[in-house]
Each structure stands twice: as C-alpha cells, then as structure tokens.
Amino acid sequence: MGAYSNNLVAQMLEIVWLNPVFIILAPTGLIFWLIGKWMLSHPPGTINISVGYRTKRSMQSQEAWDHAQHFSAKLSIRIGQVEMLLGAFGIFASGIHETVQAVFAIVVVMYACIHLMVVTENELKRVFP
C-alpha cells in the first residue's frame, strides 16, 4: 500500500507541477488577487506617476483618480479569482499538448491585462465624461 500511495502522489504532483495552465495561471491569478487586495486596502492617496492605476483619464482629477484606484482594485481581485480557478481546472487538461496549454494560459494573462485597462477606462469614461 505504501509504495502504491507514493507512486500515486508522485503522479499527482507531476500532473500539477508540470501543467503549463496551472504553472502560469495560478501564480499570476494570485498576483492579481494580492495586488487588488493591497490596492483596495492601501490606495495611493494623491495622483502620482509611480503607484496605482495611472492613465491620462485616471489622472484628470483627484476624484477620477480615487475612483480608478478603487474600481481597478476590485476588478483585479475578480480577475485574479478567475485566473486561479482556470489554473485549478487546468489540472484536468493533462491530455492536451503542453504547447497548447501554455499558449492558452499566456493568452488568458494577456487578455486579463487588456480587460483590466479597457473596463476601467470605460468606467472612467462613463462616470467622468
């Protein structure tokens, strides 16, 4: 029984740790989530060029800046949750070629970054026309 369970554990670890979807999406999802949580609890107070969600539209006024920080932090948390969930589901994609998995995961991360900016900019455009 001991040898069988050790072999099973080794197989499970191989499926998880050698899975590109898990390796890419779980950590990036965690990073999005942690940064979102941090920015929500510690938003940058004043408009600056080094920390926070910084675009021309978000820096047009202090009110727009504050709204952009809060909105993008909440969106970042949701994006992180989705990426971590996709990373967990990636464990079940072990039959798919690793290159396809890696490309899928990279596309998801790129989409997440673009989605964060587009949705936040549209929100700022809606609230501060």
Image (tube, grey):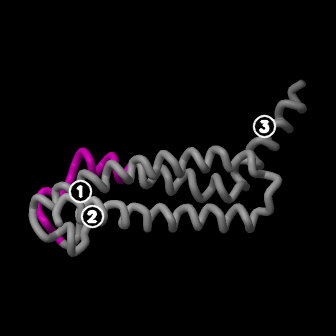
Q: Position of residue 115 (x, y in %)?
A: 43, 63
* SS type, badge 3: helix
Q: Residue sitting at 57 percent across and 44 percent down?
A: 85
* Disc 2: which residue: 53
Residue that mark 1 sits on: 69
Question: Does residue 97 show up magenta in the picture?
Answer: no
Mark 3 vs mark 1: in front: 1
Residue type, label 1: Gln
- Give the secondary structure at mark 1: helix
Tell me whether the residue at label 1 lies in contact with that at label 2, contact meaning CB atoms closer than 8 angstroms: yes
* Among numbered discs 1 and 2, the one appearing first in the sequence: 2
Magenta segment boundaries in residue numbering? 34-48
CA–CA distance in space, label 3 to label 2: 43 Å
Name the residue: 21% across, 75% down: 56
Instruction: Tell me which label, 3 or 1, sits earlier in the chain.
Output: 3
Quadrant that contains the C terminus: bottom left
- Look at the picture and state if 43 lies above or below 113: above
36 horizontally vs 21: left or right = left
Q: Is residue 44 magenta?
A: yes
Kind of residue at badge 3: Val
Report, in whole angstroms, how far the alpha carbon at label 3 lies from the one at label 1: 43 Å
Which residue is painted at 79% across and 57% down in the image? 96
Q: Which residue, given by chain and number where applicable, does mark 3 sit on? A: 9
Q: Amino acid at mark 2?
A: Tyr
Number of residues whose C-alpha sits closer than 10 Å to that of mark 1, classed few (under 14), some (14–19) or many (20 or more) = many
Q: Residues within 10 Å of mark 3 (few under 14, many from 20)?
A: few
* Residue 106: x %, y % from top left: 59, 66
Q: Residue at x 39, y 48 (%)?
A: 77
Q: Position of residue 42 (x, y in %)?
A: 22, 49
